[in-house]
Image (cartoon, rainbow, N blue to C red):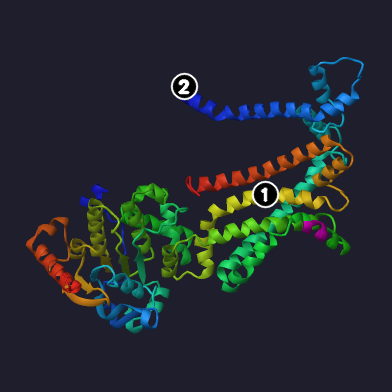
Amino acid sequence: MSTTATRTVAAPEFVPPAAAAPGIAVNAEKLSIRFGEGEGATVALADIDLTVGRGDFVSLIGPSGCGKTTLLRAIADLVQPTSGTLRVNGMTPDQARLARAYGYVFQAPALLPWRTVARNIMLPLEIMGMARARRRAEAAQYLDLVGLRDFARKFPWQLSGGMQQRVSIARALSFKPSLLLMDEPFGALDEITRDGLNLHLHDLWARTGLTGVFVTHSIPEAVFLSTHIMVMSARPGRVVEVIESTLPRRRRLEDRETPEFLALSRRVRDALHLGYGHV
Amino acid sequence: MSESAVRKATGRILPIPTVVLVILIAWYAGAVWLNAPQAEALMDPDQPHGFWTLAQACWSMDRPVLPAPDQIVSALIDSVFGYPLSSPRNLLLQAGYTAEAAGVGLLVGLAFGVALAIGIIHVRTLDRSVMPWVIASQTIPILAIAPMLVVALGVMGITGLTPKAAIVAYLTFFPVTVGMVKGFRTPDPLQLDLMRTYSAGRGTVFAKLRWPASMAFLFPSLKVAVALAVTGAIVAEMPTGAQVGLGARLLAGSYYGQTMMMWSALIMASLLAVFGLLLVFVSERLLILRRGGRL
C-alpha cells in the first residue's frame, strides 16, 4: 500500500467522461428530508442549498448525524426528499440514476465475494448489457487506473481493505459516469493507507475531470481533496458554511504542511465548532 | 512425504478403521446374544458344545434375528451378482427403481422448493400466507400421508413412478424452500443499494446477487433433501402391496422373516443415499473451486 502513496499511477489511455464542460452537476434548493411521520419524525436535512459545478470536488463534512450521508443518498436517489428541489445533471435524481449519471462508492467496498476482482468491476457493465469482450477491456483499463492490474484474478477476500476500496472505486468509474459520489470510502482504513488512497483519488480526479461529492469526517482529507468544503451541523442537518479552497488545483501530500493548508483546515475546524454549538 | 505429513495422514485415517473395528466386534457379539436362544434350540441337545461352537452356529443361521456382517455382505453380493440384471430378484434392479423415484422426486422437489422460495421473497402476501402452510405440511407424518396418496392416485389410475416421486417431492421441497428463502435474503442492504445505483431490476438483482449468494444455503439443503428423498422413496414403495423397489424388498423380507434380505435392502438404500450425497459434495466442491476456495 505504502508504495502507491508516493507513486503516481501510470495512466492508460483514458477517455475523460463528458464532464469537464462547465455547468452544474448537482443543484439542491431548500432540500429537506424527514424520516417518519408526526411527532416521532426526525428531520435529517433542513433547507439545504447546494451547488456542485462540473469538475468540482465537494466534501461534505460535519458531526455524526448531520445528514451528510443522507444528502449523498438523496443525490443518488437512494432516499427521497421530503420537500425542495434536487437536480443531478439537470435531471431529477430518479432520471439521473436511470441514465447512470453517477458512480457510488460506499463506506464498505461491497464487493461480491464470489466474483474475481476483474469480474466485480465488470458487474455494472454486465448489468448495462455491454458485450463480453468490451467488458473485459474496460475492466482491465480501470484496474490499471487504480494500480491493481496484477490482482485481476484474485478474489476480494485475498486483498487488503485499501485494495478492496480501490476496486470499488474502479467499479464505480467503470461505466464512465460524470459524477462520483463517495460516502466515507476510506473511513475504515489506517492513516498510511488513507494517505495513499487520497493521493490516488486526487490524481484520478485531476486527470479525468470528474465531478466528486465526498462525505468525510476528516478535516485534512476534506481540505486535501476538495475545491469546496461544505460544513454541516447536526439535528437538523444544516449548512454552516461553504468554504472555497484557496489551494491550487493540483496538490501533493507535502502540501498539507503549508501555511495555506493549515489556515484552510483552521477555517473548517472553526465552522465545525460553530456547527456543534455547545463546544 | 515428510514424517509429519505421514503422521498427519495416519492421524486422519486411523480413527475410521478403529471405529469400524469396534462396530464389527459389537455386531458379532450382538449376533451371538440375539441369536443364541434359537441357535441353541436347533442344536443337538445330547451333543455337548462349547461357547465357540454356539457362536459359530449363531453366525451361520439361515434366518437369524441379527445376521452377522459377513452374512449380510455375502447376501448383498449374491443378490447383486447372483441374478441377471433383468431378474426381479436382482437387488441392483430394485435399487434402480428406488433411485429413479428418489431422483425424479428430488428434482421436482428442488424445482418446486426454489420456485416457492422465489415467490416468498418477492411477494409479500406469499411470505405471510404460504410459510405457515409449508411448515404445517411437514408436521403430518409421511407414514400417514404416503399410503393415502398412493391409494388415491391409484384409484385415479396413476401408479408406478408418479406417486412415489410425488411423495419424495413432498418431503424434499421443504428443506429447499427454507434454505433458499434464507439464502435469497442474505445480500445486505449495501449490496442491494449498489444494485439500485445501477438501476438493476428485480430479475437482475436476483440473477446477479440473490442467486449466487444463496449457493451457501443450497448445498446444506440439498444434503438434507437427498437423505429425505431415499427415505421417502422407500416409504412410498411399501403401501401398495409391495411391487418394486427397495421398499418392496424390505416389506417382503419382513413378511417371510428373511432378515438377510431386509439387511441387504437396507445397506443398498444407504449406499444409494451415500451416492446421492457424493454427487452433492462433488458439485459443491466444484463450485467452491470456481469461486477461488470459498462458497
Residue A163 location (% of width, % of height): 33, 52
Along the line of sight, the residue nearer the viewer: A92 or B99: B99
Residue A121 location (% of width, % of height): 40, 58
Dot 1 falls on a residue whose secondary structure is: helix
- Left or right of residue B7: residue B167: right
- Asked if residue A129 is positioned above or below residue B31 in the image, the reply reads below
Identify which residue is drawn at 36% across, 47% down. A150
| CA neighbours of label 2 inside 10 A, class few (<14), some (14 to 19), many (20+) | few
The number of numbered discs placed on residues in the rendered structure image is 2
The numbered mark, 1 or 2, whose residue comes first in the sequence reads 2
Identify which residue is drawn at 54% across, 26% down. B10
The residue at which mark 1 appears reads as: B226
Q: Is residue B146 magenta?
A: yes
Residue B106 location (% of width, % of height): 70, 54
- Asked if residue B54 is positioned above or below residue A136 in the image, the reply reads above
The residue at which mark 2 appears reads as: B3
Along the line of sight, the residue nearer the viewer: A22 or B54: B54
On whether disc 1 and disc 2 are found on a single subunit, the reply is yes
- Asked if residue A41 is positioned above or below residue B233 in the image, the reply reads below
The kind of residue on which mark 1 rests is Val
Q: Which range is magenta? A: B144-149
Dot 2 falls on a residue whose secondary structure is: helix
